[in-house]
Image (cartoon, rainbow, N blue to C red):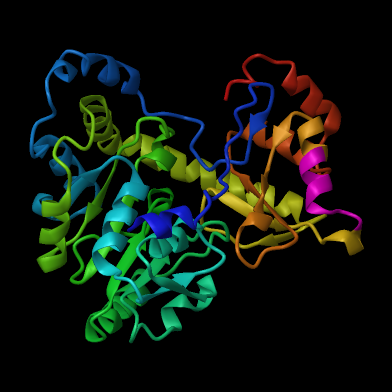
Amino acid sequence: MNLDSALGLDREPHGSSDDPDLLDFSANTNPEVPPGVETAYREAFAAARSYPAEPPAAFREAAAEYVDCDPEAVVPTPGGLAAIRAAVGLAVDPGDTALLPAPSFAEYAREVRLQGGEPAFVEPDAVLDADPADHALAVVCAPNNPTGTDYEHGDLERFAARCRAADTALLVDEAFRGFTDRPSLAGEEGVVVARSLTKLFGLPGIRAGFAVATGEFGAALGRARRPWNVSVPALTTGAHCMRQDAFVRETRERVRAERSRMAAALAARYDVVPSEAPFLLLDVGGEESGRSVERVVADARERGVAVRDATTFRGLDSHVRVAVRRPTENDRLLAALGVGDVEGSDAEASDPEGDDV
């Protein structure tokens, strides 16, 4: 990273509405948080009067149990994006190329460009068939944001083997992996896994996550990590969350059932992309259908709901993305998008419990 590369890049747009009057379906965070998390956070205050333990062994052990890897391979980070930046920073030099999915999380390309590298884009459903040779880095988002595309574990392992043979670092972003039953690729030789505790545990402001890597790359990540880079409250609440197995199971079941129900209802009016993530990508049809993205977003907003304008993702020009929330909240979304009971939505909107976001 240098001054010129940083000055040449703008910030990337993301979801999440700050309007308290809107029910936010533009961000993909869980509307529920694990039991006991507020108590864990408050109890961390006394320990926060001192620097975090270095290395933060308790957090690393909880993370290792969570993704089934060696604690020594865990590198704590302030959120998943910090893990992504660290991996890209070590893998990509000026003039290098990186194999990236698109449409996908825009920060991959931004981080590559900050290092003076150049993205080489491929469709998410074809990324595992791409040739990683001659690239410094390959990135897979599993499941992919915003399409919801996911990959079989065996297919990921085979792609990882091809990356090793090509001497190409592989970064697997598992920000949404916890919403699925598929195992993590953590601990796989030659692979850097980035995990965020933001999405599944509904705590975006805590800024807790981690990377997992072995071998020389893992050692480099560990040594490059700044001391005390994650706060005591984030380490404490993060470790607490990763041990809430029942919460994770219940969340997966709710998301799976509600995603299926929402997709069926939305398909009556929109082209719904199949998803294995806690969100759905909708093709609204564009101007020829009389439903521009701008109009769909504005109409939803007028009905008290924020949806994500997905045209900011590379290659999408007629899409919006919607999160999967609680059943009654999802009913409000369906009504706002013209496939549900508008009267029921209005009644729910006036219910203080229904407005709890």
Q: Is residue 189 left or right of residue 201?
A: left
Relative height, residue 197 to residue 267 (above, below): above
Q: What residue is shown at x 17% (from left), y 43% (from top)?
A: 226
Q: Position of residue 269 (x, y in %)?
A: 82, 55
Where is 357 relative to 1, above or below?
above
Q: Residue at x 79, y 43 (%)?
A: 337
Where is the N terminus found, in terms of image quarters?
bottom left
Camera-side residue of 104 and 66:
104
Q: Quadrant of the C terminus?
A: top right
Q: In the rendered image of this protein, does residue 53 appear above or below residue 13? A: above
Q: In the image, what residue occupies the spot 62% across and 53% down?
A: 280
User: Toward the viewer: 193 or 250?
Assistant: 193
Left or right of 1, for residue 122: right
| Quadrant of residue 111 within the rendered picture | bottom left
Give the residues drawn in magenta, as a range.
290-298
**Residue 18 occupies which quadrant of the picture?**
top right
At which x and y percent is residue 5? 41, 60
**Residue 106 x, y percent position in the rendering:** 51, 58
Task: Indicate the position of residue 250 as horizontal and vertical percent values.
Answer: 43, 38
Q: Is residue 77 visible?
A: yes
- Viewed as shown, does residue 130 lie left or right of 54? right
Q: Is residue 142 visible?
A: no
Indicate left or right for 132 with 202 as reference: left
